[in-house]
Structures are given as C-alpha cells and as structure tokens.
Image (tube, rainbow, N blue to C red):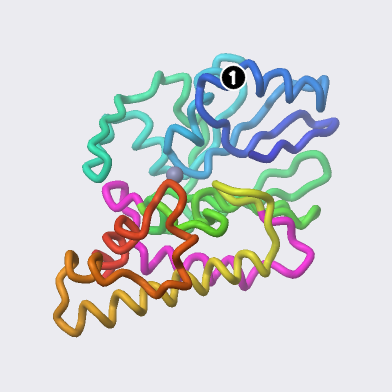
Amino acid sequence: MVASVGADGVLLVDDDYSEYAMAYEQAVKALSDEAVRFVVNTHWHGDHTGNNEFWGKREAVIVAHDNVRKRLSTLQVNKFFGRETPPADPTAWPLVSYGDSMALHLNGNTIELQHYPRGHTDGDTVVFFTTDNVVHMGDHFFKDRFPFVDMGSGGHAGNYAANVAAILAKVDADTVIVPGHGALANKADLQRYHDMLVETRAEVGGMKSSGMSLEQIQARGLDLRWESWGTGFINEENWIVFLYASF
Ligand SMILES: [Zn+2]
C-alpha cells in the first residue's frame, strides 16, 4: 500500500484484507489528521480491495479501472483456485472508474493512473506519483517471486511481461517501486523480474513448440536458476500453467 498525505487529505493505493481495517485506520491517523478522501484500487482482488467497504462508508471515493467496478459488482468464479467471490457491498464499488488513464492532483503531486490491459487481470492500474517519483505496480510486480496471472479475470502471461517492459521504460534508477507483493524495490529489481518473465516464458515456449505437453514440461521443470522464485504463493508448476496457456 501507499498513502499520500498532506493538506488536501489522504489518498490510499489499495486497502488490503478487511480484517486489517482497524490497524490501517490507526496507521492513517498516525500519519495525518485529514480524512481518507480517495482509495485507488490497482485491481479487484480481495487482498487489494478488502477495505473498500470500510473506507467507502467513511465517505472516501473509490477510484479504479472500469473492469474493477464490473468485477466487484458481480459474482467472480476463480477456476484455478476453485474459489467464488460474491458481489461486494455497493459501498465497496468504485464511485469513479476510468478506461485508459486519468490523473489526480493532490498534496502537490500529480498522480497518474495508467491502465495496463490483459496483464495480471483485465483491470490493472499502475499508479505513478510523478512529482515524488514513486510507482505502485499493483500485481504487475511480485518481487523475486513467480506471479499469479488471473486468466479467469482476463490475465495473460505474455502480455503481462510486455506490460512490465513498458513500465520499466517509464522509471529511472531513483524511482521507488512498490510491488503488489514483496518488499520495496528499485529499477534493478524490476529489471530482474522482467528478465525472469521473458526468459522463463521462452523456456516454456521452446518446450511447447517441440511438442511437449503441459505435464511433460512441468515434469522437466524450468532452469534451476529460477528455483527460489517458486517458493511463494505461486510455485513453479503453477507458473508453467500460466506460461503454457500464453502461447
Ligand atoms: Zn492480485
């Protein structure tokens, strides 16, 4: 999460799971006496939107891509993990939604929201704090881990890698890069992540075009240098599923 604080009020990027509402309310109070005026969601997943209802009921304006509003307001079925997510309470839906890009002007910062299509989902926003040179990547960045690509929500591993390349081209060595998952990062970390995406995809693409099935590729596995990347939420077997489906 990122909080922008100042005379214009508080803006949050993402709001985590609902069980942490009180902890975040206290954390925001410690930063500012001003109200939370805006919550930007990088995408619809519950670990990024779980407190929309909490903040929405306190009169914060939720802002997100059009497809986040669509997905939060309807039943979502995740076949990959066998999970169903019922529609969120209407107070949790974005009051403001956008298509390609928009900007907020708050606390001396220009805050650009840019949609990156068909990546982690179909409604991903990357948030550029252009004045302060801070970027919130949403789930276009799982630092040093294989990412989840939500194919049921319009995600695509190949386009995901292309999106990360486009974001890399917009940042510099001083940019503070906030991953959706993992510790605070910089451009070198994001470059390493990008290279993993491209090189593991090339490995799987090569094996697939030689006629190997998904199961055969999973059995052979990726190059050993990627071993540590599969120790998080998404293991190597799952990552290969997303890569295989992207060809
Ligand atoms: Zn996510």
Indicate the secondary structure of the residue bearing disc 1. Answer: helix
Residue range corresponding to the magenta coloring: 150-177
> Residue 153: image x %, image y %?
31, 47
Label 1 C-beta lies within 8 Å of the nearest ligand 1 atom? no
Is residue 83 a member of the stretch shown in magenta? no
Q: Quadrant of residue 93?
A: top left
Q: Quadrant of ligand 1?
A: top left
Eyeballing the image, is 181 above or below 209? above
Q: Quadrant of residue 74?
A: top left
Name the side, left or right, on which 224 lies relative to 195.
left
> Residue 59: image x %, image y %?
61, 18
Eyeballing the image, is 210 above or below 57? below
Quarter of the rendering occupied by the C terminus? bottom left
Eyeballing the image, is 120 above or below 208? above
The amino acid type of the residue labelled 1 equals: Ala
**Camera-nearest residue between 89 and 247:** 247
Number of callouts? 1
Quarter of the rendering occupied by the N terminus? top right
Residue at 15% x, 71% y: name it: 213
> Residue 240: image x %, image y %?
30, 63
Name the side, left or right, on which 156 lies relative to 57.
left
Name the side, left or right, on which 86 lies relative to 58.
left
Disc 1 designates what residue? 21
> Residue 177: image x %, image y %?
67, 56
Residue at 55% x, 47% y: name it: 180
**Camera-nearest residue between 161 and 106:** 161
